[in-house]
Image: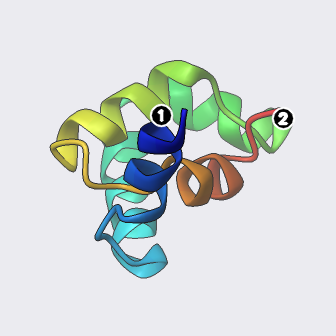
Amino acid sequence: MHLVINQMITKSMNPAAIEALVDKVLAANPKQLQQYRDKGKTSLFSATLVMKESKGKANPLVLNKILAIN
């Protein structure tokens, strides 16, 4: 459990870089972008695409906050 927490804490991307990736992913996926605009949040699909784009370097806690995934 400690290893997982440490890995999440040590992700290297800053929030601005994560936001840029979110913008890129949402722009490339119009359906997800419309869902984001309509509901103010998006699905785990978008989070998965951002993590893929960042090669796993995006901090999941920051990413979820940006995407407002509940």
- Quadrant holding the C terminus: top right
Which residue is depicted at the point 47% across and 34% down? Answer: 47
Query: If you read the primary sequence from the N terminus, does the residue marked by circle 2 or circle 1 appear first?
Result: 2
Badge 1: residue crowd in 10 Å (few <14, some 14–19, many ≥20): many
Q: CB of mark 2 within 8 Å of CB of mark 1? A: no
Which residue is depicted at the point 75% across and 46% down? Answer: 68
Residue 25 showing in the rendered view: yes
Kindly indicate the quadrant of the structure image that contains residue 69: top right
Residue 28, image x and y in percent?
A: 29, 37
Q: Is residue 21 above or below residue 1?
A: below
Kindly indicate the quadrant of the structure image that contains residue 52: top left
The residue pinned by badge 2 equals 39
Badge 2: residue crowd in 10 Å (few <14, some 14–19, many ≥20): few
Residue 31 showing in the rendered view: no
Which residue is depicted at the point 63% across and 32% down? Answer: 34
**Three-letter code, disc 1:** Ala
The residue pinned by badge 1 equals 47
- Viewer-nearest residue: 20 or 4: 4
Residue 4, image x and y in percent?
A: 46, 38
**Three-letter code, disc 2:** Lys
Which residue is depicted at the point 34% across and 41% down? Answer: 50
Residue 64, image x and y in percent?
A: 63, 46
